[in-house]
Image: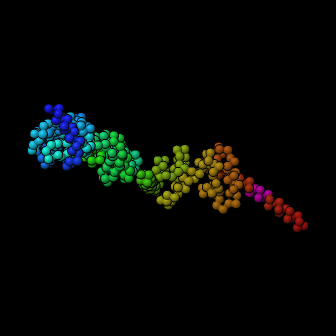
């Protein structure tokens, strides 16, 4: 007899497809193995739902018991006398969204067809990884896919910044990383990630460790320029303080040492010539000692002499020789005198005195040539006048 009714039920399912259709909505739950469903076999009133992670969709209860495979074939049913009133059912199915149909009430005048629709939930929360700055305005945020996709394939992951709520997105189902652009240089950020499927979006992950974006090229250039100006201002202040100290020392006949010249950025004074420089400063008239320019002239003289004595002598010009008094201002022979100095061996151009002596010798020769020429012109003039 049971085999007979099972056969009748199988045939009747096919015959009653056009009966009244009612939807029972079931959502997979990642946190609970089962949910409960109750409905009235006589009026199809829906109360609660359930899904078990099994391989088959199963209906159980006094109203009707039928086990249906994935092709909706009835494998077991009860007698029609047992179809009565509100009943409890347990619906069991692996939590995969889809639509599954089964004839619950096959007899009398009720002929109701129930369709079980398994709906997906939003995914569970993904795990956050690390945030890495890629440039002054972009960062990469790694993440791990959630333990449950909610019953539907994860389609996108979205990373969101704090502050600014700037977002980046990747279209994939598994773990990976997201690049966010449009961030502000030199700003600290944290990031959270969400996963989304066709049913919705997960809750946000925990935040990454805070990272500070690098400075932009413009910021770096501005900072470098500001640092340069600050350093220059500091050096200038130190230089002026050293020069003021030097002026006071000279004025009060105190010895000016090499360190003071270095701090005051007065060049040309070395360990080799400091004694000579000090002697010239000491020889200044008392009335000139309050004027730092007198000290600067002495130092400048030794600076030019140092260049003449070095391998830079080829780049010494007549203006420098005029500046330190080696050649008279407005001299017609400054070019020849400068050339004569450059022809000297290094030993004869190592001091101001030796250079001055060479210039005096050259001037004497020039004067002698002038005198000989003048005498020759005078004799010629006298001869033609007779």
| View extreme (right): residue | 386
Q: Is residue 245 above or below residue 170?
A: below
- Going 33% across and 40% down the picture, which residue do you hit? 174
Q: Tell me if I can see residue 93 in this picture.
A: no
Quarter of the picture containing the N terminus is top left
Q: Nearer the viewer, residue 176 or 53?
A: 53
Question: Is residue 295 in sight in this rendering?
Answer: yes
Residue 282 x %, y %: 51, 53
Q: Position of residue 256 (x, y in %)?
A: 47, 50
Name the residue rendered at 74%, 53% in the picture: 365
- Name, please, the residue furthest toward the bottom: 385
Q: Does the magenta run of residues contain 78? A: no
Please say if 83 is above or below 289: above
**Residue 89 x/y as whole percent:** 14, 40
Front in this rendered view, residue 321 or 37: 37
In the rendered image, residue 369 lying in the magenta stretch gets the answer yes
**What is the chief secondary structure element of the magenta stretch?**
helix
Say how the picture is coloured: rainbow
Quadrant hosting residue 14? top left
Q: Is residue 109 left or right of residue 98?
A: left
**Front-most of 200 and 147?**
200
Name which residue lies at 57% across and 51% down: 303
Residue 346 as seen in the image, left or right of residue 383: left
Quarter in which the C terminus is drawn: bottom right
Instruction: Examine the rendered structure and indicate whether residue 86 appears above or below residue 360.
Output: above
User: From which residue to which does the magenta span run?
Assistant: 367-372
Position of residue 225 measured from the top left corner of the image (x, y, whole percent)? 44, 54
What residue is shown at x 58% (from left), y 53% (from top)?
A: 301
Q: Nearer the viewer, residue 242 or 276?
A: 242
Counting every numbered tag in the picture gives 0
Residue 117 placement, left or right of 230? left
């Amino acid at each position: 007899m049971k085999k007979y009714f099972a056969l009748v039920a199988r045939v009747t399912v096919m015959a009653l497809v056009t009966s009244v259709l009612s939807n029972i909505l079931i959502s997979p739950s990642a946190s609970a193995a089962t949910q409960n469903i109750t409905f009235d076999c006589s009026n199809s009133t829906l109360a609660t739902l359930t899904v078990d992670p099994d391989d088959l969709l199963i209906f159980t209860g006094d109203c009707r018991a039928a086990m249906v495979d994935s092709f909706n074939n009835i494998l077991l049913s009860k007698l029609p006398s047992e179809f009565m009133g509100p009943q409890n059912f347990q619906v069991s199915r692996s939590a995969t969204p889809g639509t599954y149909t089964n004839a619950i009430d096959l007899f009398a005048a009720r002929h109701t067809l129930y369709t079980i629709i398994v709906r997906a939930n939003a995914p569970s929360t993904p795990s956050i990884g690390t945030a890495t700055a890629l440039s002054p305005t972009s960062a990469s945020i790694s993440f791990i896919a959630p333990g449950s996709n909610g019953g539907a394939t994860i389609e996108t992951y979205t990373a969101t910044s704090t502050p600014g709520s700037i977002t980046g997105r990747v279209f994939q189902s598994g773990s990976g990383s997201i690049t966010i652009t449009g961030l502000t240089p030199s700003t600290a950020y944290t990031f959270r990630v969400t996963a989304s499927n066709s049913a919705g979006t997960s809750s946000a992950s925990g935040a990454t460790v805070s990272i500070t974006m690098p400075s932009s090229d413009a910021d770096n250039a501005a900072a470098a320029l500001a640092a340069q100006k600050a350093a220059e201002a500091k050096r200038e202040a130190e230089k002026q303080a050293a020069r003021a100290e030097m002026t006071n020392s000279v004025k009060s006949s105190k010895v000016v040492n090499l360190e003071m010249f270095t701090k005051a950025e007065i060049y040309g004074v070395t360990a080799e010539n400091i004694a000579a420089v000090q002697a010239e400063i000491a020889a200044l008239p008392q009335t000139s000692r309050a004027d730092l320019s007198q000290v600067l002239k002495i130092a400048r003289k030794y600076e030019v002499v140092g260049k003449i004595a070095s391998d830079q002598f080829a780049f010494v010009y007549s203006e420098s020789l005029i500046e330190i008094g080696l050649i008279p201002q407005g001299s017609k022979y400054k070019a020849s005198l400068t050339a004569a100095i450059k022809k000297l061996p290094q030993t004869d151009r190592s001091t101001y005195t030796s250079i001055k002596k060479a210039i005096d010798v050259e001037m004497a020769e020039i004067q002698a040539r002038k005198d000989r020429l003048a005498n020759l012109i005078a004799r010629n003039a006298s001869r033609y006048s007779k």
